[in-house]
Image: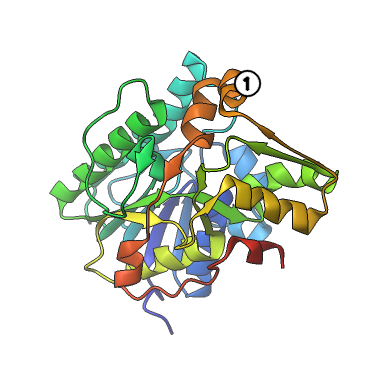
Amino acid sequence: MTEEASKKYLVVGGSGFIGRHVCQKLTEQGAEVYILSRSKENALKKLNPFWRNALSQCHWVNQLDPSMCFDGVINLSGKSLADGLWTKSLKNEIYQSRIGISQMLNHYFENCDFKPKILINASGISIYGKYKKNGEEEIISDRLENHFSQNLCVDWEQEALKAEKYGIRVCLLRLGVVIGDGGYLKRLKWPLKCGLNIQLGEDHHTFQWIHMDDVVGSIMLMLKIESMKGPVNMVAPEVINLKDLSLIYRYHFKTKINFRLSDHVVRFLFGAMGRELLLTNYVVQPNKLCENKYNFKCLEFKRNFS
């Protein structure tokens, strides 16, 4: 019997890429899981019959009844930043799918009869802006000019941290690129399997990643260790550059066509999205996870293909 047995958790975005794995792990540990999803119809398609029983009968966060009690809330909601070029309307959708939902959660926290002990809220290493050369996991309130993804993360974290005034411990997941059975790798595998390996940006740009198993394992650690709070860098200790990344793809997929697009071309093709998400030089480390003795399951990116 684990510490999570008999506990009750609300997972917002529980039918998504990360959410499904988190719900699976919590259930394996004996917890009662309650799922909210932006689209109930899409959630029913993604969830197996067992998980459909856990899908909330209320449609969204603003319909949560104050009498509903949870030991913890895990907020993984949010429209993907890589769903298309950042038009004004798409930016608004992305913003509301994060900050708007956190505002609804805070309204629920204010009025609920029993306050959760913990809120685990997604964020991203985009909060560090264009460059980050140390691993300090501090609260960031400064907003960079003309940097949508950084401003988004700042606003999201600040909204999530408001839950602290209700006595709720808040952990912020500053996620790198999550590697698993979907997401980033799913987008790449088709061209790679067809022999096409395109490096988007100059060799020196960094690629900070974390395996899905370590995302889930880190969340379980946060639920367990009550001293963990605030920002947590959710990245593997290994930092690789785009050149090494391209070589890994070339070796594993035996690609025949290998070439690189310059920074200028990436900016031209993808606009602000390319500049902010692809042409980065982050060097952040998972200090809090290491300080709390987290044992990473995947330490080398190339192991994802072994």
* Label 1 Cα neighbours within 10 Å, binned few <14 / some 14-19 / many ≥20: few
Q: Residue at x 56, y 28 (%)?
A: 263
Q: Is residue 48 visible?
A: yes
Depth check: 303 or 51 in front?
303
Q: Residue at x 37, y 61 (%)?
A: 286
Depth check: 67 or 120 in front?
120
Residue 207 against residue 229 in the figure, above or below: above
Q: Position of residue 221 (x, y in %)?
A: 37, 70
Residue that numbered label 1 is attached to: 269
Report the side of 89 relative to 304 (left or right). left
Depth check: 297 or 242 in front?
242
- Name the kind of residue labelled 1 in the image: Leu
Please state, as top left, top right, bottom left or bottom right, where the C terminus lies in the image.
bottom right
Q: Residue at x 47, y 49 (%)?
A: 176
Please state, as top left, top right, bottom left or bottom right, where the N terminus lies in the image.
bottom left
Q: Position of residue 168 (x, y in %)?
A: 21, 55
Mark 1 residue element: helix
Depth check: 160 or 32 in front?
160
Q: Residue at x 34, y 40 (%)?
A: 128
Give the total number of marks visible in the rendering. Answer: 1
The residue sitting at the bottom extreme is: 1
The picture quadrant where one finds residue 96 is: top left
The picture quadrant where one finds residue 261 is: top right
Report the side of 183 relative to 229 (left or right). right
Q: Position of residue 12 (x, y in %)?
A: 44, 47
Q: Is residue 183 visible?
A: no
Q: Position of residue 147 (x, y in %)?
A: 38, 26
